[in-house]
Image (spheres, rainbow, N blue to C red):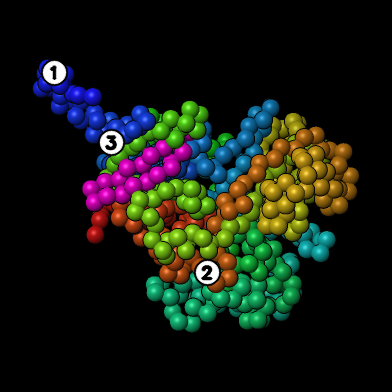
Amino acid sequence: MTFSFLKSLPRFLLRSLFILLLSCRSGGVCADKNSPDVLIVGAGLSGLSSAYYLKKAGKKAVILEMSPHIGGRIRTANYADNAHAEVGLEEFWESNPALDLMRELKIPLETFYTSFSSFYYQGTLYPFTHKSNQDFLASVLSVDEMKAYKEWDQKMTGLYKQIDQHPLANNLLPLIDLSFADWIHETSGLSSKAQEFVRIQTEPEFATSWTKISALDGIAEWYLLSGEGQAPYHVVGGNQRAAQAIANFIGTDNIHLNKLVTHIKSTDTGVEVTTSDTGTFQQQVYRAKYVITTVPLFRLNDIQFSPPLSKDRKEAIQTQSGGSYFTAHVRVDNKASHFWKTKGISLLPIISDGLLGVIYEGKSEPHKDAILNLLVNGAYADRFNSRVSGGPEDVQEALTEAFEKQWPGFRSSVKQMTFYRYHPRAIASWPVGRSRFDSLSDSLRQPQGRIYFAGDFTEDTHSNGASHSAIRVVKAILNPK
């Protein structure tokens, strides 16, 4: 084949053709015409927050999201009669920078309870009907147990302040190789009941057994519960409203849904991100100066990086574990509220310390069916997520039996259950031998070329981590070394 016909084309057409050929790849894969400053992989809280801060700084960001919706775990399910309940059950603790962001956007917030919750222990309910965490705890523990607890809690505060300083002090390093449970048993001086209180209140936070996380990370988790604890906030009308408000600020035209990122290439001058449309499987190439990945840790294994990720980053990804959540929305007759209310006051949330996980209350109109929002965690969540317990009717029966054991007579109130599963590694967790404060975790907080890593798994197990990571990467991009 000859290309002599090209000689007859006008020079401006030749130049245009040459540019087009440079911007495309075989198979019809072409670059985006309007390259942004930053490409963000993932439209969860970390990705949305990153785009928010970049826009405030005058930078253009485009978000590539593999699913058909934004928000990640920030999702709200809506039901008949204006009822709704959270799918991700995200709580925004009062130290979370996301709250400042939401207040800037005038997103209405609410809080109804403190960091401690009513809980069951050995079949007995300890109801939180008090004005403060300390008053509640005094109703659970004896005077001597309470005194020992306060001394231990003060020590925890001191240790957390040490953790917040880098590099880690030598006396803290051995805590990476000791489980939180063993460390509490061996060093806390707490009574058995007080130790169980610590376990029951913390395990739902890291979504796994306290025997499976390092003592150092257990100390970090306790920061939210120490003293009077931090108040958890939610968005009025459902957390999904926050995700949508941030998206509106960014510009929804800058968020591309159903875009599965398959390749990320970094060069000295920019980045190239290849996506595959999850509906049409059409590939598309996007280019920018930088890229921020905010996808869950396990998703990083699905992306091909060029150059490949460094050895320490690969090891960090492979050795970090994950907690497990499973959500169930239980629609019940509104008359059943007497099971979780006393003198008209709700005792929810209640930590069941069993198969039901944490029982929250969804939103529903007066005199309409009530919605209970279950956040099942740990081994029970693994069981339901993996479907080893059978089909949905088997899960419903297992949950109903657990309700009936806890609240005799409750079975007849249940009208419907709706289930939401999570990937087994969706919740960040650091096993014994690893820590969010070790050198491997530090490697993920450092950019590799023009690739920046964000997401809760780079910081902690909560939405706090998602927000802090967004601030970290945007600051680094705006002020490169």
> Are the residues flagged by discs 3 and 1 in contact, CB closer than 8 Å?
no
Disc 3 residue type (three-letter): Ser
Drawn side of residue 207 relative to residue 256, left or right: right
Drawn side of residue 12 relative to residue 388, left or right: left
> Are the residues flagged by discs 3 and 2 in contact, CB closer than 8 Å?
no
Name the mark on residue 9.
1
Marks 3 and 1, the one that precedes in the sequence: 1
Q: Name the residue under label 2.
A: 434
SS of the residue at dot 1? Answer: loop
Looking at the rendered image, the disc whose residue lies closer to the viewer, 3 or 1, is: 1
Front in this rendered view, residue 366 or 186: 186
Marks 3 and 2, the one that precedes in the sequence: 3
Drawn side of residue 383 relative to residue 92, left or right: right
- From the image, which quarter does the N terminus lie in? top left
User: Residue 269 lies in magenta, yes or no?
Assistant: yes
Residue 113 appears anywhere in the view: no
- Tell me which segment is drawn in magenta: 258-275
The part of the image, by quadrant, that contains residue 284 is top left
User: Residue 381 lies in magenta, yes or no?
Assistant: no
> Please, what is the dominant secondary structure of the magenta stretch?
strand
Front in this rendered view, residue 453 or 269: 269
Give the percent coordinates (x, y) of residue 308: 38, 55
Marks 2 and 1, the one that precedes in the sequence: 1
Would you call the spot at circle 3 few (<14 residues within 10 Å), some (14-19), or many (20 or more)? some
Drawn side of residue 104 relative to residue 150, left or right: left
- From the image, which quarter does the C terminus lie in? bottom left
User: Alpha-carbon distance for marks 2 and 1?
Assistant: 63 Å
Looking at the image, the residue that sits furthest to the right is: 409
Would you call the spot at circle 2 few (<14 residues within 10 Å), some (14-19), or many (20 or more)? many
Disc 2 residue type (three-letter): Arg
Name the mark on residue 35.
3
